[in-house]
Image (cartoon, grey):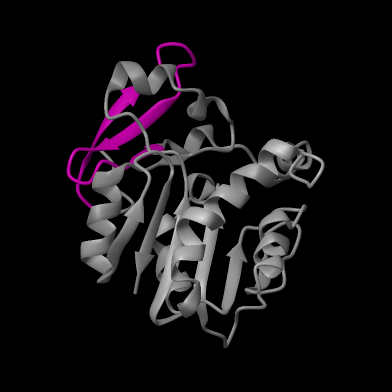
Amino acid sequence: MKKCKICNNFTLKTADPKTQKEYHKCLACGYIFLDEIFYVDEAREKSHYDKHHNSFDSLGYVKMFEDLIDEFVTPYKADIKTSLDFGCGRGEVLPILLERNLVLCDRYDLFYFPQKVYDGKTYDLILSTEVFEHLQNPLEVLKELLLHVREGGYLLLMSAFHPNNDDEFFKWWYIRDVTHIGFFNMATFKHLADTLNLKIIKHNGKNIILFQK
């Protein structure tokens, strides 16, 4: 029985009847994570990301971020002048869109922008979109990011909220991505907010949540 990577409570082990992959589900905070024996290696992980078409040529991808900015950034724009896109990917779509909205944006990505430009800096806003489901140690990363958010600043996460039902979970398209290893829901995010002294400002009940430090 493994401990939850978010709240350190014991988890229940479940298995996908289709793939036989094993997952560990926390009944306390709702976090679900894939067993480590099913992780892909770093080379395969990068190869998978290289196939993504996350550029300005992908109109749906661009529209997704335009909508995100309209709903989750623009209403707080008076407080937001500087930002970091943590895990920005190769295409830099979100940073460029933010800069078009007069928000300076630093880039960091493990594979494509590996220089830790955020060292020694704090930001009004840190965004991490479609990243946290890939992380082996999400709590550690979240704590590190919060060191770089100024007091009163914002942290935005995008990661699909899992259906809190085993049958639906194992039919869920999101777990078919071989690089997706950790899954959150609102209970998980509420636990994180309580533990890390964050305020949940807004969420869409689906895949985006905005915290204030």
Residue 122: percent from the left, percent from the top? 52, 83
The quarter in which the N terminus is drawn is top left
Q: Residue at x 74, y 58 (%)?
A: 92
Among all residues in the image, which is located at the extreme top?
18
Residue name at image x 61 percent, y 50 percent: 65
Decide: is 180 above or below 93: above
Instruction: Return the x and y of residue 171 as percentages of the image width and height.
Output: 42, 16
Lateral position of residue 176 relative to residue 153, left or right? right
- Residue at 27% of width from left, 30% of height from top? 164
Nearer-the-camera pick, 58 or 87? 58
Q: Which residues are magenta?
A: 7-33
The answer to which of 91 and 102 lies nearer the viewer is 102
> Is 60 drawn above or below residue 66 in the view shown?
above
Residue 109 appears anywhere in the view: no
196 and 36: which is toward the camera: 196
Instruction: Name the residue rendered at 60%, 82% in the picture.
Output: 119
- Residue in front for this viewpoint, 188 or 111: 188
Question: Is residue 9 placed above or below 169 in the rendered structure?
Answer: below
Above or below residue 45? Residue 132 is below
